[in-house]
Amino acid sequence: MKPQSAITNRIKILFILMAVFGVIFIVRLFYLQVFEYNYYQNQAAAQQLKELTIPATRGLIYAENGANSITPMVLNQPVYTLYADPKFVQNPPQTAAAINKVIGGDTSTYAKLLSDTKLGYVVLATKLNVGQYNAINKLQLYGVGLQQVSERVYPNGGLGSQLLGFVDADGNGQYGVEGYLNSMLAGTNGLFKAVTDVRGIPLTTSKEDVLKPAKDGSNILLTIDRNIQWEAEQALAQGLKNAKATSGGLVVMDPSTGRVLAMANVPTYNVANYQNVSNYSVFQNGVVSHLYEPGSDVKLLTMTAGINQGVVTPDTTFNNTGSVSVDGYTISNVETHNGPTTMQVVLNLSLNTGAVYVLQQLGGGNLDLQGRNTLYQYFTQRYGFGQKTGIEQSGEEQGIIFSPTNVQGNDIRYANMSFGQGMEATMLQVASAESAIVNGGTYYQPQLLAGTVNNAGQVVTATKPKALRTNIISSTTASTMRQMAYTALHSTTNFTSNNTAGFYTGGKTGTSQTIDPHTGQYTNNNPIGSYLGFSGGNGSNGTPKYVIMVRVDDNKLPGYAGSVAAEPIFATMSNWLLNYYGLAPSN
């Protein structure tokens, strides 16, 4: 009986153990299915549910193309990014070899990336074309995918590179309007969550799909006229070549609106190949970012202040001795013209002593705080020096101008400022101030954004001109200054021969000294030549059609840089514009 009892007991124990294990299994299974359900569901989803970005399409950039027409400056073309999830890659060396056969590259690098299962997403290649996309797709590589993105293309080549800027490898706008208006152009990416198969390919019919649509960027229209921009770049490049110079700038503005019609810089680059540029400073738009002492162009602005304040007229005469002493420093003229001299002759011959005389009259006849305060008020609160214009360009500089209460804002500083030395400004600031003077006294914010364009290429919104300040001078002063600039230009015989006869064209040369980096003193070596002028108006009572500002940094020709280097570029550009607009002579 004992053996039989022992066997029975063993069976009972085995049965009990099996029952216990069965209960444990059932309890465990219940626990996993009920209490741990969410955990394991999330684990499965983590392996199969992928988050994919739906890139927004970046907005296109258009420019004016003459009257009532626009043309694309920046377009998009599809390219593809090759990526992989190493956890799904079955044979990294074999997959790497297959990829290499289609797109080239380093097979060992591909294999190393594909083998690192700690990585959930690796980029293997970018900017693949449609042919490469189709070839990779045919291979049906597990864990390997392709994502379409856009690449910028430029139908006009390198035209307007610096004002346009570029989009970097990460899709971010850099420099120019691409940088300044990046958020407007970029749009907002969408999000796509999809269950994938073992190869990481989305199963788009899954109920787990969640789609957040991408919001494409806005297409924008610039105030730039493509034809004027092309001519500006040609005229500047040829003019610098004639002057044996290597750098400079040119800007064309509509003084009635503040709209910028062209911005040209030398040296420049081809925006389509920005990645090949080694000197990154060339990316900057020098018209808004290059600070310099504007020189004698500013005499127009100082004279305007004097006339508007009623302390001088074109016929006001002072005794010019060829030099003036200020705080122990001697300010001299370049041209010799001693004796009684009118304000008109001051502009004709660009006499520094005449500009200082105007400053003295603003102070009641002396160089003092009153005169400095008045000139400072005109320069900053009316003309906009010392502050950014707000134009749609990355990298704009605000310039440097010292207030009369600053220790450096003394009499000698302001005497120099009266003829454009001792201060720093951009070309756009000077051109904008002149535009406000010749249009009758309204300072418009310089503008590059003309509006937005729909996908059919039609302008749907237009940006209105923005008048920041009105009545900065009287209309009478504006008329007087247009006539003085006209007379100053036509007193220069070497310009008159280059100017289309019969048009009301006015302007002023500028030749500014530079600071010697070794001595810290002004030097006549490599002076900056400039020309600030207008044309296309109907005599002294009409607003000119355009304002042009030219800067030549390193003229090598003998003579005054403003006259021999910058003035001919102005003449070329102005004469071309008169023909382009089909304007009739005013006299």
Image (spheres, rainbow, N blue to C red):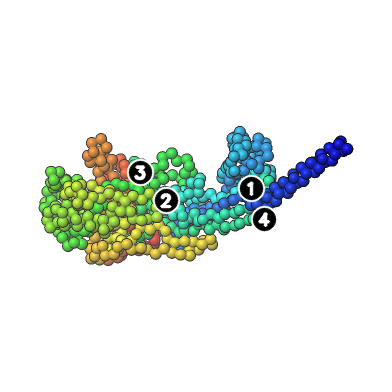
Where residue 555 sits, quadrant-wise, is top left
- Residue lying at the far top of the rendered structure: 108
Task: Identify residue type, mark 4.
Answer: Ser
Residue with the mark numbered 1: 43
State the mark number for residue 247: 3
Q: Nearer the viewer, mark 2 or mark 4?
A: 4
**97 and 62: which is toward the camera:** 97
Q: Secondary structure at mark 2?
A: helix
- Residue 399, image x, y percentages: 30, 50
Task: Identify residue type, mark 2.
Answer: Gly
Q: Nearer the viewer, mark 4 or mark 1?
A: 1
Q: Earlier in the sequence, mark 3 or mark 2?
A: 2
State the mark number for residue 262: none
**279 and 488: which is toward the camera:** 279
Q: Residues within 10 Å of mark 4 (few under 14, many from 20)?
A: few
Q: Earlier in the sequence, mark 2 or mark 4?
A: 2
Q: Residue at x 36, y 41 (%)?
A: 246
Q: Secondary structure at mark 4?
A: loop
Q: Residues within 10 Å of mark 3 (few under 14, many from 20)?
A: some
**521 and 535: which is toward the camera:** 521
Q: Nearer the viewer, mark 3 or mark 1?
A: 1
State the mark number for residue 176: 2
- Residue 413, image x, y percentages: 19, 48
Task: Identify residue type, mark 1.
Answer: Gln
